[in-house]
Image (spheres, rainbow, N blue to C red):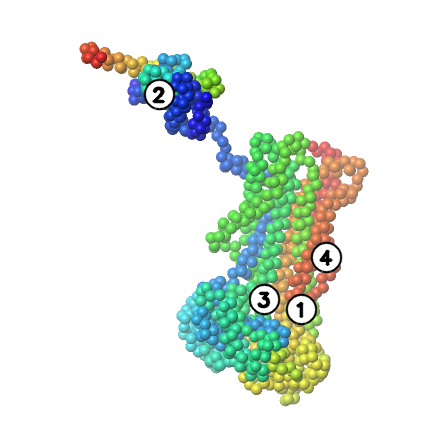
């Protein structure tokens, strides 16, 4: 597994796509991330990450419908590929294993 | 309500086109959300930040297009391919086009080389543009004359008085000499004397010896490489001596390379001027030297000229007074002039004749003088030849427009625009021109030796000799290609696709085509007329009655070798019945017949008359068959005849008296007491110079001719030429052992006076035929095209009963009309131009009507032949065949 392939922001974006599927496109993702993190997230950053992920084969995309707010422009909808899904679960598995090795009381002290 | 427009424009500018839709959509959607959440003002601000967030390479980088926009070269290759296919598909047209153009270009390249060659005279010396030749301008008694000969002291005086004049050098001539080295002896006619500064002014490379000191001492001589080889084979002759005329000896101090081909002055030997110290004592009216001066760099010659005028008058004034008996002031007050002027070295060859009007008689025989008029004529011919070829190209390309029309229509439909089509056709014609130039270069390489022979030049193509030649050639190709291609390009590209694709090109009467063909033929006819007139003038000259019998006269050019034995030699010659008469004279029928000022009757010193004079013996009239009009010629046994003169009719007219016999003439002389001569007879005018000029006033002096330049003329009995020659040669051997008798026939030497015209005539003949050939090639192409177009019409006419001759007439009518119109245009132009040319001659042939008829017939004949080749074929064709063709 090529861990270095997936940056932190990319991982979050990939997760967001999986979560928002099948209506995942940059505006929705950016809004979602903003809401979740409280920081401002620009569509440009999200879009760039989406493109990178697509290039790596973790996502596919197709053009979706157009709406009035968009001035009649179509949106690009992203879905997670099988590879993307596997990478996500791999990442999660690694994290879980690491989490599981942390002594439970230490965990308590944080909060 | 809408997001900031400027931000959108900014985004549109940097963002890759394939991403614009989704990016802009996203931005707008989010903006709408923000307006709801945050209000418009904050949304707009945030919008800017969002747009800026897209400035990343991922969004800027353009996607490679699936259908890349074609580059310029793609289309260029297509043009080349189509051009090549067109060339191959229409072999006849292409051949006519390319050969016609190649011929035209070859002609113009050759003529251009010729002109270039003429322009580059006397550029070999390092200070060429600071070097000037002095010449004397005189206006005496209303007669203007410019002489290239100056007084001996002129150069030195200028150097002494004006610091701007750096150096001066003189060339003089003191007659032919016999040079002997060992057992080799030759009579040398090209021995000139020169000052020791000669090689400072003219940088001529030496093989042996030192140019700076070579001509310093008396009796030293420099010879050319060729002469060195003649006497010494390949040895270094410096330090050896020539025995001169059996008396003196000249020490050889240097061997120079032969004079450059493009030097106006050339000789075989240069003798030091200090050999003749008396030269510096000569007075100012004895103008016998050519003087060259070198001015300081950047000095304007007119300033020196102005200052020179005054200075020269100071020197010359007293001597004029002595000679003419009147002060110089009153001489000048009568409107006369006598001044020294400067002529740039580089203008001597080309402009002496026309611009400076320098009397060719005053030039050395070693000086070559060109004629700027021929230069312009040749330039014009070169241009017109090219024009004819270019017109062919234009005509054939537009005539073929029908076959290209479909292509144009389709190209336009597919999306080509007019500019691109023009580009295509220009590319095509530049390509063809390039091909034509290649062929032309080949033709030039092959024909240049022959042309050199005819023109008497040493032209070389030498493409790589000069950094400018190859780029110039490319520029030429581009220029001619554009010129030839421009009209067809504009014409063809103007087609409307809807018209040409639906119904083909409508046949239209091309008035431009008529105009072009008429132009071509006008040029060709002018050239033909020129050729006819030049030829008839030459014939006229050769047949003109010169006032004496030029046939059966043999001239011994080196008779002076015999010295005192000349009289005895002459007497012995006359023993033989094949020899009728013999007379020795000074130089005749060449340039350089001397002249002098004479005073006659009431003419005072302010208006002397200028006469040429000849030194002759008593047998002149008998030998040449010149007629006397009154009085007598010199007679043997009359001692008083040495102070008698005989004049010609032109001189008689100058004297303005009916009866001049026994009147007296005084020869103006500065040195001695003026000599007075009694006029004893008048001879009829005869042409003692070339027919370029009329008979000038002439005087005969009776002199025992022993001077260096004397020639023995021998009248021999017709039909006994060989016998006479044998006799002359055997007699010569009795008197002179070392040197060969050099003789020539007078009529042949007279013919040589018109060498330049003979050459021009030959060149004119060649180029006029070439021009009509090229014009006819174009006509041939047009004829093919026209008959092809009318195949069906001819078939129908034949079916309906037209005869072959009617069809021939129909097909040729247009062409003949063109040539007739061309004839009408060309005739006055040719008449005017050739009249100008004829002004060069004092005796001119008449331009008569038959010349125009001849030229017209020739042009129409040739055109008809060209056209009929195809029209006969078309007329004879079985109508069944021609009607079925589609």
| For residue B313, above or below residue B663 | above
Point out residue B25 in the picture as x, y percentages from the top left corner: 44, 21
Q: What residue is shown with label 4?
A: B852
Tell me the residue that label 3 is attached to. Answer: B353
The reply to whether callout 4 and callout 2 are in contact (CB within 8 Å) is no
**Label 4, label 2: how far apart the Cα atoms are:** 97 Å
Q: Is disc 3 on the same chain as disc 2?
A: no
Residue B219 or residue A81, whichever sits in front: A81
**Structural crowding at the residue carrying mark 2, measured as other residues with C-alpha within 10 Å and reported as few (<14), some (14–19) or many (≥20):** some
- Circle 3 sits in a helix, a strand or a loop, which is it? loop
Residue depicted at 55% across the width and 41% down the height? B427
| Residue at horizontal 48 percent and vertical 70 percent from the top | B293
Q: CA distance from mark 3 to mark 4?
A: 31 Å
Number of residues whose C-alpha sits closer than 10 Å to that of mark 1, classed few (under 14), some (14–19) or many (20 or more) = few
Q: Are marks 3 and 1 on the same chain?
A: yes
Q: Secondary structure at mark 1?
A: loop
Q: Which residue is mark 2?
A: A41
């Amino acid at each position: 597994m090529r861990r270095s392939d997936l940056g932190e922001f990319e991982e979050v974006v990939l997760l967001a796509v999986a979560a928002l599927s099948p209506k995942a496109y940059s505006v929705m993702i950016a809004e979602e991330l903003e809401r979740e993190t409280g920081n401002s997230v620009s569509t440009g950053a999200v879009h760039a990450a989406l493109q990178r992920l697509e290039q790596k084969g973790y996502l596919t995309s197709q053009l979706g419908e157009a709406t009035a707010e968009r001035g009649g422009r179509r949106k690009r909808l992203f879905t997670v590929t099988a590879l993307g899904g596997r990478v996500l679960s791999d990442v999660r598995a690694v994290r879980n294993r690491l989490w599981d090795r942390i002594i439970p009381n230490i965990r308590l002290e944080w909060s | 309500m809408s997001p900031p427009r400027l931000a959108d424009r900014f985004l549109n500018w940097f963002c890759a086109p394939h991403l614009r839709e989704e990016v802009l959509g996203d931005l707008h959607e989010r903006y709408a959300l923000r307006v709801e959440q945050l209000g418009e003002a904050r949304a707009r601000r945030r919008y800017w930040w969002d747009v800026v967030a897209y400035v990343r390479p991922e969004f800027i980088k353009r996607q490679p297009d699936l259908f890349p926009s074609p580059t310029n070269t793609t289309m260029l290759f297509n043009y080349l391919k189509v051009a090549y296919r067109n060339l191959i598909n229409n072999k006849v047209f292409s051949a006519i086009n390319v050969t016609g153009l190649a011929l035209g270009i070859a002609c113009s390249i050759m003529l251009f080389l010729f002109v270039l060659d003429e322009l580059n005279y006397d550029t070999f010396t390092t200070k060429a543009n600071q070097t000037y030749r002095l010449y004397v301008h005189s206006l005496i008694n209303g007669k203007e004359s410019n002489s290239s000969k100056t007084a001996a002291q002129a150069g030195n005086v200028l150097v002494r008085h004006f610091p701007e004049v750096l150096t001066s050098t003189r060339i003089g001539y003191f007659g032919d000499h016999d040079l002997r080295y060992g057992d080799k002896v030759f009579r040398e006619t090209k021995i000139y004397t020169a000052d020791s500064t000669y090689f400072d002014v003219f940088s001529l490379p030496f093989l042996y010896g030192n140019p700076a000191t070579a001509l310093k001492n008396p009796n030293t001589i420099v010879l050319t490489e060729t002469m060195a080889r003649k006497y010494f084979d390949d040895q270094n002759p410096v330090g050896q001596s020539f025995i001169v005329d059996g008396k003196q000896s000249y020490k050889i101090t240097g061997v120079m390379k032969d004079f450059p081909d493009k030097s106006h002055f050339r000789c075989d030997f240069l003798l030091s001027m200090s050999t003749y110290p008396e030269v510096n004592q000569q007075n100012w009216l004895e103008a016998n030297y050519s003087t060259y001066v070198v001015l300081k760099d950047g000095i304007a010659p007119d300033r020196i000229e102005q200052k020179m005028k005054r200075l020269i008058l100071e020197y010359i004034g007293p001597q004029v007074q002595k000679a003419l008996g009147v002060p110089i002031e009153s001489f000048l007050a009568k409107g006369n002039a006598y001044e020294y002027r400067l002529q740039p070295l580089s203008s001597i060859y080309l402009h002496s004749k026309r611009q400076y009007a320098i009397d060719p008689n005053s030039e050395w025989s070693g000086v070559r003088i060109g004629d700027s008029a021929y230069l312009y004529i040749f330039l014009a011919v070169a241009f017109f030849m090219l024009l004819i070829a270019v017109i062919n190209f234009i005509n054939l390309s537009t005539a073929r427009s029908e076959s290209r029309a479909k292509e144009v229509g389709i190209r336009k439909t597919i999306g080509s625009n007019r500019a691109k089509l023009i580009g295509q056709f220009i590319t095509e014609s530049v390509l063809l021109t390039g091909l034509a130039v290649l062929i032309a270069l080949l033709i030039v390489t092959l024909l240049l030796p022959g042309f050199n022979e005819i023109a008497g030049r040493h032209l070389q193509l030498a493409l790589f000799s000069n950094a400018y030649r190859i780029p110039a050639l490319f520029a030429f190709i581009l220029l001619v290609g554009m010129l030839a291609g421009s009209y067809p390009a504009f014409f063809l590209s103007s087609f409307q696709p809807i018209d040409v694709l639906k119904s083909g090109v409508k046949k239209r009467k091309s008035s431009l085509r008529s105009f072009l063909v008429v132009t071509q033929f006008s040029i060709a006819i002018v050239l033909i007329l020129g050729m006819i007139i030049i030829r008839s003038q030459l014939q006229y000259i050769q047949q003109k009655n010169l006032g004496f019998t030029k046939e059966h006269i043999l001239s011994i050019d080196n008779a002076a070798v015999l010295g005192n034995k000349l009289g005895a030699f002459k007497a012995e010659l006359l023993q033989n019945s094949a020899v009728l008469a013999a007379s020795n004279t000074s130089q005749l029928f060449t340039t350089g017949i001397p002249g002098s000022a004479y005073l006659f009757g009431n003419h005072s010193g302010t208006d002397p008359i200028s006469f040429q004079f000849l030194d002759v013996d008593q047998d002149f009239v008998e030998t040449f068959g010149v007629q006397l009009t009154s009085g007598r010629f010199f007679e043997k046994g009359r001692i008083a005849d040495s102070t008698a003169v005989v004049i010609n009719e032109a001189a008689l007219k100058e004297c303005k008296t009916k009866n001049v016999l026994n009147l007296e003439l005084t020869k103006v002389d500065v040195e001695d007491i003026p000599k007075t001569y009694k006029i004893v007879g008048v001879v009829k005018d005869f042409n003692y110079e070339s027919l370029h000029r009329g008979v000038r006033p002439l005087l005969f002096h009776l002199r025992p001719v022993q001077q260096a330049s004397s020639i023995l003329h021998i009248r021999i009995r017709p039909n006994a030429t060989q016998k006479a020659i044998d006799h002359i040669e055997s007699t010569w051997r009795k008197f002179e052992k070392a040197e060969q008798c050099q003789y020539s026939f007078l009529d042949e030497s007279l013919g040589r006076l018109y060498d330049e015209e003979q050459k021009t005539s030959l060149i004119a003949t060649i180029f006029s035929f070439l021009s009509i050939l090229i014009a006819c090639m174009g006509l041939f192409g047009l004829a093919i095209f026209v008959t092809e177009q009318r195949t069906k019409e001819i078939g129908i006419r034949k079916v309906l009963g037209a005869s072959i001759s009617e069809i021939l007439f129909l097909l040729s009518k247009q062409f003949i009309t063109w040539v007739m119109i061309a004839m009408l245009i060309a005739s006055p132009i040719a008449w005017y131009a050739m009249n100008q040319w004829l002004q060069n001659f004092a005796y001119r042939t008449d331009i008569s009507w038959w010349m125009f008829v001849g030229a017209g017939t020739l042009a129409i004949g040739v055109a008809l032949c060209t056209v009929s080749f195809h029209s006969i074929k078309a007329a004879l064709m079985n109508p069944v065949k021609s009607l079925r063709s589609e």
